[in-house]
Amino acid sequence: MASTFGRLAVKEIRANELFPSLLAIAFCGIMPILFTMHPTTITQAALPGELFMPLTAIFCFGGIFLPEQVAGVTDVLNSKRTQLVSIYMIRFGWYTVLLSMINLLLIIGYQLPNFAGVLYFDFVTKVLFVGSLTVFSYAASRSLAAAYLIPTVYFALCIGYPHLGPLNLFILMRQHPWTDNWWQLGVAVPLLVGGFGLVTKRAVRS
């Protein structure tokens, strides 16, 4: 069973995630141009992970629903032993690992051992929070546009409205306690479970 799932994951990533992943890596490649790689404060170091990576996450996680937008493909996949929700989970896991690795390389490049743990926790939390919001937006609306639009609007809200408290994406940039990330994880988990639950329920009914 595990080997079958592993082969499915490799096949799926090669077929549908390779090109978007390369685009995401290329997109992140401009971070050294936009941001300093020699920050002197944790606020400065947080800029790429809190301001740039959430946009990359929206692009990646919104795309996990893209290949099945062709009419009839979803019904065919749901009729197989491996349902569509399994494919979505593989894609979500893949992009979570990919973006986490990019964040890790960024933090290693900083050479700030005193801040490394806090920065990595903060950056990965942003990936999971945005990813879960994207999944739930699509699952609740059944609209690919909503999967991109709702997280983007939330990102803009975080920029223009500073009173979101611990759910503001820009925790370190605005010098809030890093422990606010636990609140974001606490929201991300039910959003993710609920989103995949809705997709699974819909697949069973179809």
Image (spheres, rainbow, N blue to C red):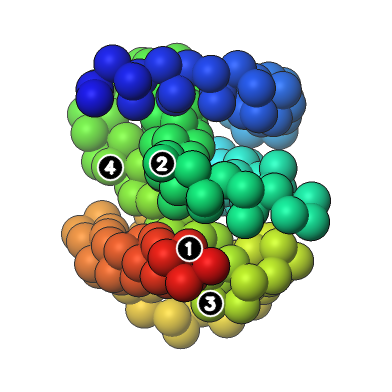
Disc nearer the start of the sequence (1/3): 3
Compared to 17, does 171 lie above or below?
A: below
For the residue marked with disc 2, what is the amino acid? Answer: Arg
Image quadrant of residue 53?
A: top right
Foreground label between 1 and 2: 2
Residue on which disc 1 sits: 203
Which amino acid type is marked by label 1?
A: Ala
The answer for how far apart the CA atoms under marks 1 and 2 are is: 12 Å
Numbered disc in front, either 4 or 1: 1
From the viewer's side, name the closer residue of 28 and 9: 9
Q: Which residue has dot 4 on it?
A: 121
CA gap, disc 2 and disc 3: 24 Å
Compared with 69, 109 (above or below) is above
Q: Please, which residue is most extreme toward the right here? A: 70
Residue 65, x across and y down, in percent: 63, 51
Q: Which of 160 and 80 is in front in this view?
A: 80
In terms of sequence position, does the residue under pointer 2 or pointer 3 come before the other?
2
Q: Name the residue under label 3.
A: 140
